[in-house]
Image (cartoon, coloured by chain):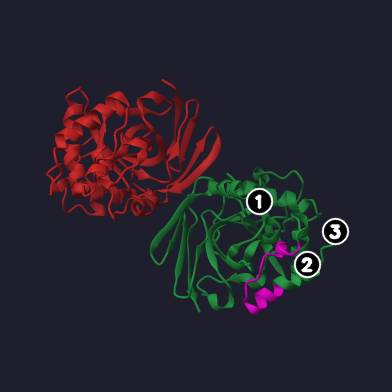
Chain colours: A red, B green
């Protein structure tokens, strides 16, 4: 049975984003909602946000680690659009009051130089379409109360994307083994976690191929200039006003954010 | 005043190794066994062991330190008998409850000693860096131990394999990516910073610790600078691979 009234659910998420008041998970009332239902709601939500003047500047892929997939009970990543209003630069101060229950995680971002459309995209098809690789941090957030999400809930909620801070330093992919890019993540100068590119689906490049193929099934292409966020390299960390987070990537350089109240 | 019989405790640990049988933590009945007495037990084991080829660090992750409520790592010695050659299988039947972890290995180009040695001194005394796989094998049942226990047990050291060394110039070991795979599946990732923020800082701590007893590192010695991910259990039939960016890959097959 398909999801009942995805437009109303999208509207509820839209209001939750606007008011910063979270809503109960859709799967509380409808426990059978699945991934497809989640995307049906997401597809209703995106036009509401674009009508406010936002634009899609890329895509995020989430649930790319084996540990996260096990936790949510799936064996595939999920995705959502990256909206221009949520993109920050390296060094920016990020206002906490934009979010409901934010957490931060370091990840590798690809920027596309040419169009990539699946299906049929293999891992070796991705590299020629990549303009460069950049250090990034994602702020994940949930419009669902207390992060009490099942798969359909998070997919509907733009894959729990909140914002992204991206380094302006775009590094050519040639000669890089993105699996092996090491990363150290600090909060206020204290080491919080470390990781390497392979934590994202075995290779961040494979994440882009996966996304191109999944979107390709729906006739959607990855466009030149799009950024693709390839998934966290470590467990997400809650943030508080005054915190300074820095993710330093071997071969890519650092990205830093400050967290402010408003 | 110390009433602990360190020779008796060392004998218990040696017996556990010989009989391949896990024992209860020493601190279960020797309640006044403290960290320094643990090192005294380890010293007895070191004096009884054959030639030493180097040293190792343990409890080098800040998360692990916070978990057990300490702010320093611990160290142990590497007897030559624990070294596996490249391509040589790990015989799990010789061990009790082996676990593998990825390490960055420092090979000393010259002697290094002193109470004020820093990471920079370590790096300038290092002739080579290599991928390492350490095989831990706590002699204590289910790896249940206090810091004093694990130090007495030579920080669970059992076997290790060291890859082909590369010159350290230009390598920032803090940032290198680290992959631990088992049977072709990714188990964990890390970067070098997972050991004490900088693996060379972990080695420097070791040198300062050794200085307290008038010892130091000798040219040619290897130092396993601390596990970079949680250790993964291994059984016969497993193949463990550790890849470290700029250093290479080491593979270790486990047989019975």
Q: Which residues are magenta?
A: B14-30
Give the answer, above or below, for where A61 lies relative to B3.
above
Residue picked out by circle 2: B44
Residue B233: assigned label: none
Q: Quadrant of residue B179?
A: bottom left
Q: Residue at x 36, y 28 (%)?
A: A99
Given contact means CB atoms under 8 Å apart, are the residues at marks 2 and 3 in contact?
no
Evaluate whether residue A112 shows in this view. no
**Label 1: chain letter:** B
**Could you tell me which secondary element the residue under label 2 belongs to?**
helix
User: Along the horizontal axis of the image, is A86 left or right of B197?
Assistant: left
Measure how far apart labels 1 and 3 are at the Cα level: 24 Å
User: Along the horizontal axis of the image, is A13 left or right of A253?
Assistant: left
Evaluate whether residue A20 shows in this view. yes
Number of other residues with Cα within 10 Å of mark 3, as a class: few under 14, some 14 to 19, many 20 or more: few
- Mark 1 and mark 3 lie on one chain; the one further toward the N terminus is 3
Q: Nearer the viewer, residue A258 or B54?
A: A258
Residue picked out by circle 1: B73
**Label 2: chain letter:** B
Share a chain, discs 1 and 2?
yes
């Amino acid at each position: 049975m398909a999801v009942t009234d995805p437009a109303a659910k999208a509207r509820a998420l839209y209001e939750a984003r606007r008011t910063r008041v979270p809503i109960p998970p859709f799967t509380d009332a409808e426990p059978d909602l699945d991934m497809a239902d989640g995307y049906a709601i997401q597809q209703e939500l995106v036009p509401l946000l674009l009508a406010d003047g936002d634009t899609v500047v890329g895509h995020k892929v989430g649930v790319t680690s084996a540990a996260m997939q096990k936790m949510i009970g799936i064996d595939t990543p999920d995705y959502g659009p990256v909206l221009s209003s949520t993109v920050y630069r390296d060094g920016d101060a990020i206002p906490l009051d934009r979010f409901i229950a934010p957490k931060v995680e370091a990840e590798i971002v690809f920027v596309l130089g040419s169009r990539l459309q699946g299906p049929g995209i293999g891992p070796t098809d991705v590299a020629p379409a990549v303009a460069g690789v950049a250090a990034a941090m994602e702020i994940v957030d949930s419009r669902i109360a207390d992060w009490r999400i099942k798969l359909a809930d998070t997919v509907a909620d733009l894959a729990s994307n909140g914002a992204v801070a991206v380094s302006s330093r775009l590094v050519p992919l040639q000669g890089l083994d993105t699996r092996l890019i090491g990363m150290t993540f600090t909060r206020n100068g204290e080491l919080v976690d470390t990781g390497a590119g392979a934590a994202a689906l075995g290779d961040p490049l494979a994440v882009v191929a996966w996304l191109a193929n999944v979107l390709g099934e729906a006739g959607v292409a990855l466009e030149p200039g799009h950024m693709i966020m390839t998934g966290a390299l470590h467990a997400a960390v809650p943030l508080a006003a005054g915190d300074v987070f820095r993710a330093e990537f071997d071969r890519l350089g650092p990205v830093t954010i400050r967290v402010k109240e408003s | 005043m110390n009433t602990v019989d360190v020779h008796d405790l060392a004998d218990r640990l040696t017996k556990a190794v010989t009989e391949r049988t896990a024992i209860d933590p020493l601190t279960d009945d020797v309640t006044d066994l403290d960290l320094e007495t643990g090192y005294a037990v380890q010293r007895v084991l070191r004096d009884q062991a054959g030639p030493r080829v180097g040293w190792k660090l343990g409890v080098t992750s800040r998360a692990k330190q916070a978990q057990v409520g300490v702010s320093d790592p611990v160290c142990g010695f590497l007897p030559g008998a624990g070294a596996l050659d490249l391509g040589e299988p790990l015989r799990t039947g010789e061990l009790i409850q082996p676990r593998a972890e990825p390490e960055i290995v420092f090979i000393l180009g010259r002697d290094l000693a002193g109470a004020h040695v820093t990471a920079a001194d370590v790096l300038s005394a290092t002739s080579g860096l290599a991928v390492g796989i350490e095989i831990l094998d706590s002699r204590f049942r289910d790896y249940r131990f206090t810091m004093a226990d694990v130090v007495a047990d030579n920080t669970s050291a059992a076997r290790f394999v060291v890859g082909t060394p590369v010159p350290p110039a230009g390598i920032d070991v803090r940032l290198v990516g680290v992959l631990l795979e088992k049977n072709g599946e990714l188990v964990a990732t890390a970067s070098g910073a997972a050991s004490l923020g900088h693996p060379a800082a972990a080695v420097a701590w070791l040198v300062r610790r050794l200085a307290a007893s008038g010892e130091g590192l000798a040219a040619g010695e290897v130092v396993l600078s601390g596990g970079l991910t949680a250790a993964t259990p291994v059984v016969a039939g497993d193949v463990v691979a550790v890849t470290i960016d700029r250093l290479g890959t080491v593979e270790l097959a486990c047989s019975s």
